[in-house]
Amino acid sequence: MMSHQETVARVHEYVSALAAWDYPKVWVGEYGITADEQLRRQKSNEEFPSLAVEPGELVEIEGTGHGLTIPSMSADWIDGLYVVEHLMDEVPEDQAPELYVHVREIWAAKRGCVYVLQAWDVDFRPMGVLTDEDRCVAKAFTDDGFVLVPGSPVYRRIAVENLRPEDVDEELVEHLEFYARGEPVVFPGYVVPDNERTRWAVDARLDE
């Protein structure tokens, strides 16, 4: 079993890695890839022609019976932080909780902090940010779209250097490690509808 100092050292390692990541991209209309990703794919196609894939090609995901259409290069994406702050009502219900936590963890890491579980509470939460666990225990719905969720977790943001032994456990370490790896949280990526609001956000980013 690791000591508190060793555990905090791991937390610090993952927080530092998280802080270096950009916020996740949220694609508009359909999932795409950036110009850099397109160049890497072209290089891979040249090095391994037998495994080459092209935009629009349907590739089977081994063992699933399903396929993934290879995305095309696109600039139609919005910074995840902007989406969480301004466009969460556009995010599909099955992606909203994951996007919120993904952005939250990077936001905290860039400030040298982590979110730790402080307590469980009864809460009214917007339908769009409910997790699968929330939906299983939801008790009531309000006319304005909120859901009564018993046992909602309450998190507290703490600077890494101020973590106490009771703040840190293996679950927190594994949680941070997952996000620090930079792997897709929602496969293949977050996508919102292509409409006037999301298109304006894309144009505003491109005009910066």
Image (tube, rainbow, N blue to C red):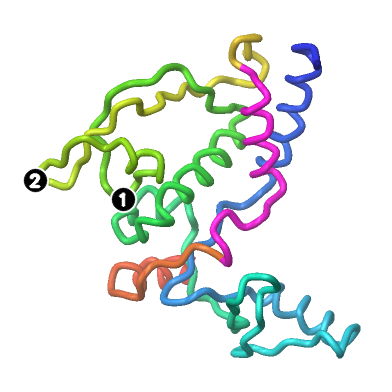
Q: Secondary structure at mark 1?
A: helix
Residue 26 versus residue 109 in the image, above or below = below
| Residue at left offset 47%, top offset 21% | 156
Where residue 167 appears, as percent x and y from the top left, is 59, 15
Q: Residues within 10 Å of mark 2 (few under 14, many from 20)?
A: few
Which range of residues does the magenta coloring cover? Answer: 168-188
Residue under pointer 1: 128
The alpha-carbon separation of the residues under discs 2 and 1 comes to 15 Å
Q: Is residue 173 left or right of residue 135?
A: right
Q: Which three-letter amino acid code belongs to the residue tagged 1?
A: Gly
Mark 2 — residue? Answer: 143
Tag 2 and tag 1, C-beta contact below 8 Å: no
When the figure is inspected, residue 136 is found, relative to residue 81, above or below; the finding is above
- On the rendered image, what quadrant is the N terminus found in? top right
Residue at (73%, 87%) from the top-left corner?
A: 53
Residue 15's spot in the image, x, y percent? 68, 34
Q: Secondary structure at mark 2?
A: loop
Is 172 placed left or right of 192 in the picture?
A: right
- Residue in the image at 36% along x and 28% along y: 152
| Residue 88 included in the magenta stretch of the image | no
Disc 1: CA contacts within 10 A as few (<14), some (14-19) or many (>=20): some
